[in-house]
Amino acid sequence: MADTKMNGGLASRRDSNMDEFFNGVNLPDAPATDLTEKMKNFVLEHETALHELYKVLGEDVGESWDAELDPIGIDVTPIDQETVLTMVNMYEDNPQFNKIVTVFAHLAEEMRDLVELAETSFYGTLTMFGHREHDGDDDHDTKAGNHNSDSHSPTINIDPEMEMGEFIPFFQDLVNWIQRAQNVMQNVICQLACLYHARQKLYTTTFKNVRMLPIFESLGALCRVMVTFDAIIADNPAIADGWHQYKRMIKYVRSDPAGYGVEEGQLRVFEGLLVRLDRKVLNATIFEDAVSQEFGLPGAVSNESLVGGNKVLYEEFTEALRRLLKKTSAGLGADVETYPRTTVVELFALYALYRRVFAASSKPDKYMFKGLWEIQLKLPIVLLHGRAMWFPGKFLDDHAPLKTSGLNPNPAQVAKKRREYLRSLDDDFRSKTEEIYMHVMLWMVRMESRQTLTLSSAGGRGMDALLSSRGKLLINGLLLANQIRNLLTTSISLHLALQIPILPKNVRPLAVLAELLKAIQATYHRSSKMIAENIAHLIGQTLFQLKRLVAPIRQGLQNTSSSRMTPGKIDVLSALNLAVACLDGTPTAARRSVIEVSLCVAQLRKSMRSATYDDVQYNLWKLDLLSSFQQKLTHACNCDCLYWIADVIPVFFTDIFKNPDQVTRIPYLLAALRDCQNLLLAYDPTPPSATLIQNGGVKTALQHAPNAQAKAFLEAFRSEVLGHFEEQIIKPLAREVENDLRLHIHSVVLQQSSLRTVKFKDLRKFFEMRPLKFFDVMVDVKERVTHYLDTTFYNLTTVTLHDWRIYAEMRNLAYEQYGLKMAEVHLPGSSHYSEGLDILEIMRNIHIFVSRYNYNMNTQMFVEQATDQKHLNTISIQHIADSIRTHGTGIMNTTINFTYQFLGRKLMLFSEFLFDDHIKSRLIKDISWFKDNNEKLKNKYPFVRAEKFNRAIRKLGVTKKGETYLDKFRRIITEIGNALGYVRTVRSAGMQYSSNAIKFIPDLEDIVEFAELVEEQKLSDETKESCSNLDSVLKSLTDSFGGNTEYLKILVNVIKPALQKERFRHLRNFHIIVPPLTFNFVEKMSIQKERISKKSGRGEASFTDDGFALGLVYLLKLLDQDTAFDSLHWFNAVKDFVSEKKNEIAAAKSKRAKSNSTDMQHVQLTIKRLHNIRREFELLYYSFTGARIFFSESNEEKKKEEESSNEEKKQEIANNSQENHAAKVPGDPGVAAAAAGAPPPPPAKQ
């Protein structure tokens, strides 16, 4: 027992010690939990990294994903397959009432479909029709907003008649739309006339107190589309011009149908279609034709009494206009307009229709006309679409004129009032923009805060209050967008219409308004999740409010006894039952039409209080807004109107650059400019009917690729905007940064603080902005500026290599101040480069280099020509080798290509000189003289003859510098030789560089291929790629070190065949001019060497010029005249001449016993001159002979050349034999000459 107790005590003591050891250590419950936690942290970190990556690569203007990049989009528009007939026939207790609701709901839906088709398929194409390069529409140009289509028009141009012919199917579809719209309009008027008639029982029982405002509003929308068509066609002169040219073309076809492959019958049918098209569309009288048609039932006798003479319909139409006028004008011009301004156009169009329908039976209401006329004081213009504008006063004068007194404004002062309105708008534009800006900022803050608000954090207000607050925010943002767009489009339209320039102070507010629209749209997109989760609840809440409002009325009617139920109450109850049933379903467009028509009947006089009526109208408006929320938001935030003031875009960018604190506006401004895409891509001659498919009774538009012309529009606009961005922001920003860095460095180096007195803007905000994307182009401001500075610093460092340290400090300063990570230049320092010219600089300016430098063949060095400077620049092999080390060996081939092009230009001048009549005749004369006196001269060209040739050339004229034509010819040859010397130096430098680079390779004969070794070891792909690169570098070095490429011989072989053609026959005389050229060269070198020792004088001094000898040898080799020149024995002739002169002087000196000092001085000068001539000719001979080695051929090359010449001779003999066997034409001198073995005469000149 004792042992047991002892063991237990030890165990308990050991457990307590272990507890103390693990105290404070939290062990996981299980290894899986720890692993899960690690994986969770990894996923979160990866999500953060992806978000940061997207912030760099994305193009959205906020923190959410961009709508254009979303793989899946959220469409919250209600969709239902149920038709109007199915909805209405749910209750069959009142079939007559159901028929009326069905008819008017169908008509409302039909008119809505026509409006949507016109807006999506016709507006844009009509607006962009005829958009051309060099399209000058002076009627709409202003100084501030001139739409210069030169700047963003495509390069694709077609004739107007061809374009109109391509658009004929499109216009035919438009004719069909117009015909359908006119039929629907007539149907609506006839249905209303039949319903609102004194003899109609339904009217007396029910519809006497019913106002069908939704039907009139839909009819007004349809009329507004026709007005818009007229405005677009009238505003676009290209349509009228294209139509005129097309009709002229048809006249030619009509005069000769067979010649154009057209049958007369088909042509007559086609002409009928064109006449219909001209009458219905292209006269811009679509609306006028629609309201002027006869309204009535087909075949009815009493159409006048049914429509025009229907007093009940007249009173109903008048009451509808009054209510619409009151509703439209109530909020017009207010801070928040609940209805779009196009409703004003709809009201005026309805009034014009009203005046035409009842023109014969009733007098116009002056008070209504005055009310409509006064609207232009609040709204002088409405932008319909694109650049098509609508003026209230002008519309009334054209379609519903009325002469009456007391109009405000006076008809004669309408134009003045518009200018006053614009002046007032310009004065208050900035303040209005600032006020709207504050409202938008407040709304955005509330919108962001409401996203995180939950039911628990709502303060106990409940779900209904939370939904109400969110719904109010959604609607307020849309109303703000409408307000901003109204202000923006009104300002732009008035400036364009009145041709008044935009004030400079209003340029920034104009851009800010467009940016605010995109900010609102971006805020909605950031709230996409919240909207998608709540939109259905918001619509359901609105539907519930409507049901709650009509429930008491419905309950009261249901509780009414059958004896007290009149036909009117029965219809009201049927309408309420139908409305409530539709409110229980999805609020699609068709269902909303049924609800609106039903509630019109339910809102009988005395059946609904005014407060309840207002609540019903508000909830119907809210329901329509929420159900088509996304479409209305897209339209309200559309900024395509900026396209028509494209000339102001650079001013927008300039303003942002001058105010770096505004840099955050750039993404929003680019987003606004991207909206022009929809307008530009709307150009499409494809008829809308070709893109519609029938799917279960519903027509759906197919998406197809944009037209090539539309793509060209978009590409040109993209290039223009990016060009403005480059010129107004990127380049000025780069120059500002460069100047700041220079002044900062110079102020430190020169210790002059005055250099930093200029206050630079805080440009760092531009570099803190993440990369932007405009269409398909990424714009990284930081990268662009960095590239500019890298390029500038590199180029300047190559010019002045001793400043490399200063530019290195500027790069460090750029990183510290602006965060710009610039690349190192990696140019060799001055100790390696000796401040010599770079091979790239020489290559680009080789024509200047060869004219200002002299070549020394022995040292392979170029020396600058001295004119009066104390120091001369030199270019040696070491300089070129260091330059090759910088740029790589690939620069050598490029140098040869540049030299080849330079030689081509110089050889043309060389040929022109020898082709000159004065030179050619003299050379031919010398050749003939030398042949005649060859034996007498002992095959030596006389020195005196060369000297005489020089004097004769001088007689032809000299330049202001005293140079003869032979001097210029010698300079050409010298420049050719300098270029060849440069090629030789580059080759030698390349070999030196290769030898220095390859000295680390142990054995050049046995180089191991690393790629094969890596392949055997099966290493990674990266290692294989690295070894392959190493093998290619080693092969390139060994090939370069081998020096197998003879560049000088290549330049001979490439050019030589071209100069052997017959048209260069005059070059065969070149060898005879070489002696005068050498004499001219020797005289020049003697003068230049004498000037070296002189301290004064501005003449050219030099001690070497081997370029002439090299050029001379190259040309002789090129023209195969080495043998011809050697036959002159020129250098031997010079040696003999000098010896002969010396002997003559010695003989004359021995004959004279006494000589005076003057004679002795003359003799010494003559001897000195002869000595200089002999020395210079000997130096020239050595250079000439040495240069010939460069072009000498080996035995194998000579053998190949002899074989090729033999083959050519054999081929020539074969050709001559064939000619001899051919039939000979009598009297042909060419044939006779060929038979005699003589060359044929030259062909006669054409």
Image: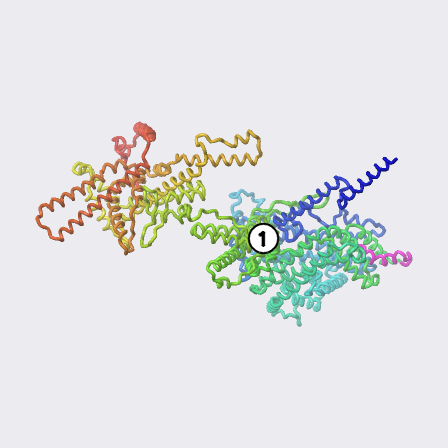
Q: Which residues are magenta?
A: 543-564
Secondary structure type for disc 1: helix
Q: Position of residue 244 (x, y in %)?
A: 54, 53
Q: What is the three-letter code of the residue carrying label 1?
A: Met
Q: Badge 1 local density, few (<14 within 10 Å), some, or many (20+)?
A: many
Q: Is residue 1077 visible?
A: yes
Q: Residue furthest front?
A: 2
Q: Is residue 283 visible?
A: no
Viewer-proximal residue, 1099 or 488? Answer: 1099
Viewer-proximal residue, 1054 or 241? Answer: 1054
Residue hosting label 1:
128
Residue 118 included in the magenta stretch of the image: no
Q: Is residue 1014 above or below residue 29?
A: above
Colouring of the image: rainbow
Q: Position of residue 991 (x, y in %)?
A: 40, 38
Q: Residue at x 58, y 47 (%)?
A: 707
Q: Residue at x 19, y 44 (%)?
A: 944
Residue 548 included in the magenta stretch of the image: yes
Q: Residue at x 81, y 64 (%)?
A: 610
Instruction: Give the image quarter of residue 27.
Output: top right
Q: Is residue 464 left or right of residue 1083?
A: right
Q: Quadrant of the N terminus?
A: top right
Q: Is residue 658 left or right of residue 73?
A: left
Q: Quadrant of the C terminus?
A: top left
Q: Main secondary structure of the magenta part?
A: helix
Viewer-proximal residue, 1123 or 607? Answer: 1123
Viewer-proximal residue, 864 or 996? Answer: 996
Q: Position of residue 901 (x, y in %)?
A: 38, 43
Q: Position of residue 1002 (x, y in %)?
A: 45, 33
Task: Count how many numbered circles sit on residues in the image.
Answer: 1
